[in-house]
Image (spheres, rainbow, N blue to C red):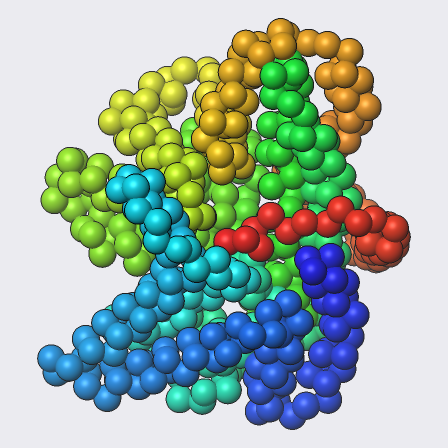
Amino acid sequence: MVFSSLTFLLLFLPAVLLVYCLAPRQGRNAVLFLFSLVFYAWGEPVYVCLMLFSTALDYTCGQLVEKHRGTPRQKLGLIVSVCVNLGLLFFFKYTDFFIGTINGVLGTAIPQLHLPLPIGISFYTFQTMSYTIDVYRGEAKLQRNILSFGAYVSLFPQLIAGPIVRYQDIADQLDGRVHSFDKFSDGVKRFVTGLGKKVLLANNIGLLWSAISATDVAKLTAVGAWLGVVAFAFQIYFDFSGYSDMAIGLGKMFGFEFLENFNYPYIAGSVTEFWRRWHISLGTWFRDYVYISLGGNRGGLWRQLRNIAVVWLLTGFWHGAAWNFVLWGAWFGILLICEKLFLLKWLKKAPGVVGQLYTKLAVLLSWVLFTFDDLGKGWAYFRAMLGASAGFVNTAALYQLLSYLPLLAICAVASTPLMKRLYERMNAAWGQRLLATADAARVLVLSAMSAAYLISGSYNPFLYFRF
């Protein structure tokens, strides 16, 4: 289904662009709304009704907030929006987790629901809530056109795996965005770049992780285990940042300007900096709607540390209904609290390489927590990384290392701003005409290679679809 969704997107896009361009300006949001529902229904034919319900709910809640502004009833729309949205998210995503936990603790046998998780529910739930919250706070104007609001909620470029687009960031663009050839051209380049990152880098380095994670942990050497987690780190980065690039590029093609979601996180010199560069839209959402609402850094150091702990437990839980995600969030929460108390000051005084190594080690260890739902397997993998399972290295690990070394090197370079800086120098040295020719050639080559891979390949997961 995931493979067909990406293929469907590529086949679906020309028709959407054609109808969108032919439609009158005042009808373009309706076109986006309709085609976005068709795209979502391709993967979730039943749960498209859930998205329509969320759209109608928050549109109505926004109307209630505006209608009763300045009165005690103003909070009614906000409370309904937050409670119903979080209730739906809890029901579909977390019910079985809590039933399983209760059964395990109390020895009961409550049957689980085994409901399929609606694709992208964690993303669009946060988006719809942001609208009501922004209107309540007076940070965005009420949207009176339900078709325009529906286009915002269901916007297919970033519907399934983000970035999370807050209403206040595109409120003005919904009715007054600018279309131009340059913006469309930039969008195409950004989309193809993201497609290449996803299909050529994430998918191929993901094959290495799949092979290593399928190996019996008892037979996994330290070199093999570290090689696996490095492969997973590159896979999840290029998978998610590639999808974000595609979403941002598609947005430009339809006149939107979405905020960046990644900024070379693997070059960070601290965990604090890493989370300013990784999944920026999620971090910004939790900061603005949870951390600040809890009081932020007001009220003293200990209250600030409490707020950080709450935000990171929620961040971990947002990613999945399993204890490994809770531990993953707690791991980063503890590190961020330590950096707030003393570690960040120490890192600033130490040589830069110390912060780089510490951050990479912290992030790599976190990916082991992140990827293993089974805590026992995760612990066994940690032991393998220390050489406690099958020693330091064997011929299988060396073969995998040598076989994937060129791809690992490409991923390492591509995860830094080195190519961006090279592009900027080329821009200064070559001039616009020559650079435009090189850009066109790059787009054609990446498109052809990605298409060839999609036609011939079968391994094409989107890791963030499950969130």
**In this view of the protein, can residue 154 be seen by the observer?**
no
Residue 327: x %, y % from top left: 38, 34
Residue 37 visible in rendering? yes
Q: Where on the picture, by quarter, is residue 31? A: bottom right
Residue shown at the point (29%, 26%) measured from the top left: 338
Q: Nearer the viewer, residue 59 or 263?
A: 59
Left of 337 or right of it: where is 162? right
Q: Residue furthest top?
A: 391
- In terms of image quadrants, where is residue 192? bottom right
Image quadrant in which you'd find residue 89: bottom left
Q: Nearer the viewer, residue 246 or 106?
A: 106
Above or below: residue 26 compared with residue 83: below
Q: Position of residue 139 (x, y in %)?
A: 31, 71
Residue 145 screen position, x and y as percent = 45, 89
Towards the viewer: 49 or 464: 49
- Quarter placement of the N terminus: bottom right
- Vertical placement of 56 versus 312: above or below? below
- In the rendered view, does 421 fall on the left or right side of 458? left
- Residue depicted at x 52% and y 61%: 116
Q: Is residue 414 left or right of residue 317?
A: right
Q: Residue drawn at (38%, 67%), measured in percent from left and top?
A: 88
- Picture coordinates of residue 105, whole percent (x, y): 28, 39
Q: Residue drawn 18% across and 51% down?
A: 295
